[in-house]
Amino acid sequence: MSDIIIEAKNVTKLYGIRRDEAMELLEKGAGKAEVLEKTGVTTALYDVSLQIPRGQIFVIIGLSGSGKSTMVRCFNRLHRPTAGSILFNGSDLTRMSGEELREFRRYKAAMVFQSFGLMSHRSVLGNVAYGLEVRGVPREEREKRAAETIAMVGLEGWEENRIDNLSGGMRQRVGLARALANDPEILLMDEPFSALDPLVRKDMQFELLSIQRKLGKTVIFITHDIDEAFKLGDTVAIMRDGRLIQVDTPERMSANPADDYVRRFIDSSDKSKVLSVRNIMITPASLIKQSDGIDHALREMRKNALSSVYVVDGRMKLGGILTLNDAMRAKREGLNLSDVMIREVTTTSTDVLVEDIMPLSAEAPYPLAVVDDEGRLLGIVTKASVLSSLI
């Protein structure tokens, strides 16, 4: 099976009568505003091509009118593209018959909306089981599966409650459970958390990440919030005026924005939630081996104007830190390096987010040592490098 579950090929979506004229203008490089002024046609999408990896959270971000919501609706054919194709596991959704589309929506794709879309006359259990009911699943089986997904989203014990009795965050959990109960291959989420208050929204983001990592579902998530996009997305796509601007991982996008528009988007984000230790670590200016003597350690510190030095073995495995005071004491008392070096060193790994090491960095008396799985020293993280990453 291909690693790509959905592929958009040159997708364009136009609204209006004079679409042929609009397409000619777009092909000549005209922008959305110019096309609307000259033809009265709205360009929702133009020439969008992208691939969505299986089993990832793929986030599409953009401001109002960027085309992000139109794009996600093309993925389940709620909108039919004016031109281009949408492939799901290699099959073109734009060429599917009505019956094929119904099967696709019932079994392969599920959607979670911002407005929840729940039925107030049904209980939590009745709402979650609705999709299975439409598919003709027997009552006992569908209620069993619905109860399992209700528990998965943290609403166990609320099965018989009416929707009117639930908070906004709980309603969104019901919407998520209803989508998951159908066991879809892809989960389409159109700004599902934007109406929630910040604390509930944070909880729902964590809930989605936990469920996705557990089930391995492909999630296509729409948002206008760059922090949310970078927190959730394995891959992020930025759109503007119906066009795709950049697709990349949050980390690479932060390091290499495609243009000033993307750069301005990223500048508004909390970089500590995007950048990892790998992005900010530096090479230690001074290293010595455990077999080296105290005089060599003092020369290294003097040469590099440092008051400490990292100690490694022949395979670069971190042994500890030797401070200037301890080195001087060892020289006075005739001690060996191993007698005085500090062995309890705070360490981290390259993939840890800057946000997660900030408390460690603030409290540690020395720069954090970055090591691999075998304890080999890869670099160090100073307080200055942590602070500079936030600017």
Image (cartoon, helix red, strand yellow):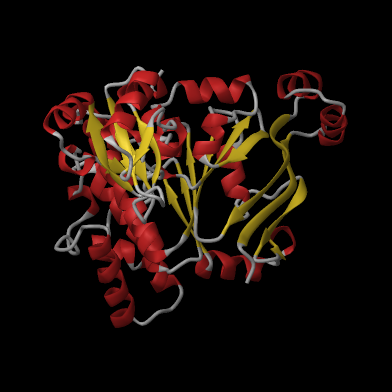
Q: Nearer the viewer, residue 308 or 338?
A: 338
Is residue 62 shown above or below 210? Answer: above
Q: Quadrant of residue 22?
A: top right
Residue 342's x, y, as percent? 19, 38
Residue 292 x, y percent position in the rendering: 33, 40
Q: Quadrant of the N terminus?
A: bottom right
Residue that appears at 58% across and 67% down:
104
Question: Foreground: 186 or 126?
Answer: 186
Query: Among all residues in the image, which is located at the extreme left?
Result: 333
Q: Position of residue 121 (x, y in %)?
A: 27, 57
Q: Quadrant of residue 382?
A: top left
In-front residue for pair 17/188: 188
Image position of 120 (left or right of 385): left
Q: How many marks?
A: 0
Dividing the image into 4 quarters, which one contains the C terminus? top left
Q: Nearer the viewer, residue 240 or 299?
A: 299
Q: Position of residue 384 (x, y in %)?
A: 34, 20
Residue 55 higher or lower than 234, as above or below:
below
Apparent side of residue 222 relative to residue 303 in the rendered image (left or right): right
Q: Is residue 118 visible?
A: no
* Residue at image point 20% right, 48% down: 166
Residue at the spot 52% in from the left edge and 24% down from the top edge: 265
Residue 81: tell me if it is visible. Answer: yes
Query: In the rendered view, would you say 353 is above or below 104?
Result: above
